[in-house]
Amino acid sequence: MNIFKELIKAITPFLQENGYRKKGSTFYIKSNKNYGIVNFQRSQNMAPEIVKFTINLGIYSDVLGKITDWNYDTMAVPEVSSCHWQSRIGCFRPEKQDYWWEIRAGDSLQTAILDVKDNIQNIIIPEISKRISDEDLMNRLLNNEFMGSTNLNHFKYLTLFLKEKGDIESLDDVVHKFMQGPDGKKCYDVAMEHLEDINYNYIKNDPQN
């Protein structure tokens, strides 16, 4: 018996009942043009009789993808690695550390399935629902609650959202603070290229000042 395949098979109806569709070991839900991604990642460095896996979460924004992804026009369902917001189940569990399930030959698969379903219902689905809209992602960026990625990418994402929303006052404030800060000075040329891409006219200063 392939334990990992049996696990995915058992979890599939539960996720489908909650609006998710299956693609391999990944499940996705679409809201407007954005995607919520749930990806089951199996460890390859284990003995054949042991299955070890974790769950990755992701949100893909269509607004951001149009600018940030070179293959936007040909992309179907995005991979979790292409998502603009990414995290793992361990970040939301009480331990607040990376978490992997481990199933050995002879262990109860049903026990693992019930535990995974509990995490999906009480953690994964709610956390994705909190972030799947552009407004949700933008607010988390504004409140410094955006996990993963770099400060430069956070700057790019936030300026794209604000430009799309038409909130020029907030956009001006974000640009000024970033460009005058250490990250803006360190990444000056890349940040300027991004601002030109979104047709934002920033008055260039000497990046050393």
Image (tube, rainbow, N blue to C red):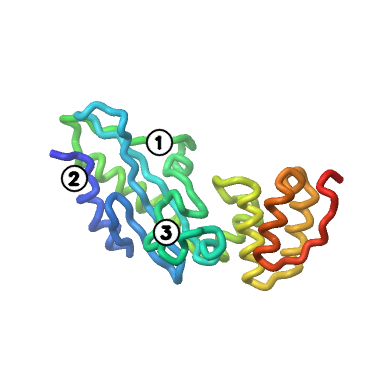
Q: Secondary structure at mark 1?
A: loop
Mark closer to the chain start, 2 or 1: 2
User: Vertical placement of 37 versus 19: above or below?
Assistant: above
| Residue at numbered disc 3 | 36
Label 2 Cα crowd, 10 Å radius (few <14 / some 14-19 / many 20+)? few
Q: Which residue occupies the extreme right position in the image?
A: 209
Rounded to the nearest angstrom, the CA distance separating label 2 from label 1 is 20 Å
User: Vertical placement of 207 versus 159: above or below?
Assistant: above
28 sits to left or right of 1: right
Res 102 quadrant in image: top left
| Residue at numbered disc 2 | 6
Residue at the image point whose x is 26% and y is 45% from the top:
114
Residue at the image point whose x is 24% and y is 26% from the top:
47
Residue at the image point whose x is 36% and y is 47% from the top:
119
User: Could you tell me residue 117's position as x and y percent?
Assistant: 30, 49
The residue lying toward the viewer, choosing from 187 and 118, is: 187
Residue at the image point whose x is 25% and y is 51% from the top:
11
Q: Amino acid at mark 1?
A: Tyr
Instruction: Name the front one of labels 3 and 1.
Output: 3
Q: Which residue occupies the extreme top position in the image?
A: 47
Q: Secondary structure at mark 2?
A: helix
User: Vertical placement of 191 versus 99: above or below?
Assistant: below
Q: Amino acid at mark 3?
A: Gly
Q: Amino acid at mark 2?
A: Glu
| Residue at numbered disc 1 | 99
User: Vertical placement of 111 versus 62: above or below?
Assistant: above
199 sits to left or right of 207: left
- Asked if the residue under mark 3 is in contact with the one under mark 2, i.e. CB atoms within 8 Å, the reply is no
Q: Secondary structure at mark 3?
A: strand
